[in-house]
Image: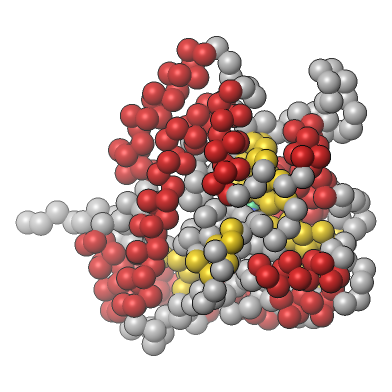
Amino acid sequence: MVDAPEPILLNDFRRAWAEVGGGVLEATAKVGSSGWYILGEEVRRFEAALAILWGFDHAVGVGNGLDALEIGLRCLGIRAGDRVLTTPVSAFASSLAILRVGAIPVFVDVDERGLLDLDAAEERLRRGDVRGLLPVHLCGHVVDLDRLEDLAQRHGVLLLEDCAQSIGATWKGRSTGSAGAVAATSFYPTKNLGAMGDGGALLCRDPEHAARARRLRSYGEGARYDHVEIGLNSRLDELQAAILGDVMLPRLASWTGRRAAIAERYCSSIPSRRIEIPVSAPDSQPVWHLFPVLVEPHRRESFRAHCGARGIATGIHYPIAIPDQRAVAGLELEEVNELPRARRWCASEVSLPIHPWLDAEEIDRVIEACAAWPG
Ligand SMILES: *Cc1c(COP(=O)(O)O)cnc(C)c1O
């Protein structure tokens, strides 16, 4: 009798722990014995390392990715009533940040990669009443940074890239996030650089943006107990910063390399007859936060059941377009034309496992399951 093979998970935190556990315990002991738990040396060190990795002058650690986006929008000067153009296919947080500053999301359709369609975006920007642009480098794929920069300059809009899924991804060698003055990311545990809890960061070029972000993450406090604006409580813990800086960040390049190698195997070996693999842009180097494939909407559940029966977990990113979420019903928002590709993406997408701890046999199992799917 052969044992059934282990299930293949979308994210395998137990295997991650086998690799990082020792280092995490050391980092924990270091912070514990330091007697300093909030906004101290660990956060400063991690912020410095992250800024260098990302090619920004400043990084500001915050409580999570949503807050990084909200604080980023406020640093740029987005105000209540402003229109911010964004994508309908993302984590809800991208649009929630716009709503939390009181701004109005303007949803533009996506392209065949599920990324903001920049032609449609440009057409809407020509009307001149949009103040902000919030694209998302979804799944670790890269929105054209040259065009983003050009759009922001020519139409005078404030640009904030959501890099929660794209740490390390580049366009012609430039990091995502670099087209605008600030960029936001998340250290939610499933992200490519994940903490063991919540965390996020804002990357800034301008020291004034960085100073404002530091103030906003801490009750809008200028000098101690001197509150100069209405801020948040959104601090990155010393513990998370030590884990990220000592244990996770030094391994990020190797984990990203594993993801890219798995993606290459999938792209070259998964038969494309019934399963469409969106190809990455030639000028980009994606980081494969997710590996999305598209199937006929009415066959999606059959495909997921087929994988599930072979012990392969799959996900959907995302099943509901943001303007279709019940939470935004009745709120002021704008849909530019219909959003047919966004809704088709939401009805067709399936994410295959691509975490760095998949072994060769498991990668083959995923490919074989795809090949064996009758469609
Ligand atoms: C995860 C994620 C966020 C939000 O990050 P949190 O840390 O969970 O608040 C925002 N945008 C995108 C694209 C994400 O994937």
**Residue 348 makes an appearance in the image:** no
Residue nearer the viewer, 129 or 149: 149
x then y, percent, for residue 352: 41, 65
Please provide percent x and percent y for residue 324: 72, 66
Who's the residue at 65% across and 40% down the image? 59
33 versus 96 height, above or below: above
The residue that appears at 78% across and 63% down in the rendered structure is 133
Residue at the farthest left position: 1
Considering only vertical position in the picture, is 193 above or below 148?
above
In this image, 292 relative to 260: left or right? right
Image coordinates of residue 198 in percent, x first then y, are 58, 38
Residue 308: x, y in percent?
A: 35, 64
Residue at coordinates 7% horizontally, 56% vertically from top-left? 1
The image's colour scheme reads: secondary structure
Q: Is residue 207 above or below residue 91?
A: above
What residue occupies the far bottom of the structure in this picture?
A: 273
315 lies left or right of 367? right
Q: Is residue 269 left or right of residue 128?
A: left
Which quarter of the figure has residue 30? top left
Q: How many marks?
A: 0
Q: Do we see residue 120 in this rendering?
A: yes
Q: Residue at x 50, y 29 (%)?
A: 242
Which quadrant: the C terminus? bottom left
Q: Is residue 298 above or below residue 29?
A: below
The quadrant holding residue 20 is: top left
